[in-house]
Image: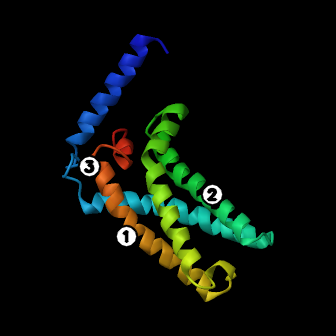
Amino acid sequence: MDHSAHHSAAAHDHAAHQAHAGHAGHGTGGVTWGAAAQATLHCLTGCAVGEILGMIIGTALMWGNVSTMILAIALAFVFGYSFTLFGIRKAGLDLRTALKVALAADTVSIVVMELVDNGIIALVPGAMDAHLADTLFWTSLLGGFVIAFLITTPVNRWMIGRGKGHAVVHAYH
């Protein structure tokens, strides 16, 4: 990319950020808990789909706990990014730009969500060895999602208030 094209892209990004900073009270300190919760719920949906699918696949293939957890976490990232990617591609962004936006929007949120959720599952006695048909499996998984949501929402609120995380996505809507 030549210097003028880079400058033009940077100016567009700055203009989009400035427009977003004044939009819907998302400037620093003006982010609503509802906006943060919505961003977190969006992330949680992708993470939940990926994790549950990973658990089902790992269990069906009779993999061990570590292999199943690695697959579940990888799929949580894939689905978490994909949900954002599909939404912003509909807004007309090219694939490369859309990928950058999805990575910027969701990485921290997904990392926090996965650390908390999988940490809860690892700490609940017997949860790692529970099967899909066991109540303990589902209660620990869903409990982990609830706790991850409660911890990740303030993180997303803080990031959106600084023009990061899901604030990047809103610049393109």
Q: Position of residue 154 (x, y in %)?
A: 32, 61
Q: Vertical placement of 150 versus 16: above or below? A: below
| Nearer the observer, 134 or 126 | 126
Alpha carbons under labels 1 and 3: distance apart:
18 Å
Q: Check disc 1 and give the amino acid type.
A: Leu
Q: Position of residue 46 (x, y in %)?
A: 53, 59
One can see residue 90 in this view: no
| Residue at 23%, 41% in the rendered image | 21
Q: Position of residue 123 (x, y in %)?
A: 55, 78
Disc on res. 161: 3
Q: Vertical placement of 91 versus 109: above or below? A: above
> Disc 2 marks which residue?
75
Q: Check disc 2 and give the amino acid type.
A: Leu
Q: Vertical placement of 155 versus 164: above or below? A: below
| Nearer the observer, 128 or 30 | 128
Tag 3 or tag 1, which sits nearer the N-term? 1
Alpha carbons under labels 1 and 2: distance apart:
22 Å
Q: Residue furthest right?
A: 61
| Residue at 32%, 58% in the rendered image | 36
Where is residue 118, by image quadrant? bottom right
Q: Check disc 3 and give the amino acid type.
A: Gly
| Residue at 29%, 35% in the rendered image | 17
> Disc 1 marks which residue?
150
SS for dot 2: helix
Residue 167 falls left or right of residue 2: left
One can see residue 137 in this view: yes
| Residue at 65%, 87% in the rendered image | 134
Asked if the residues shown at circle 1 and circle 3 are in contact, with their CB atoms under 8 angstroms apart, the answer is no
Tag 2 or tag 3, which sits nearer the N-term? 2
SS for dot 1: helix
Q: Position of residue 53 (x, y in %)?
A: 65, 66
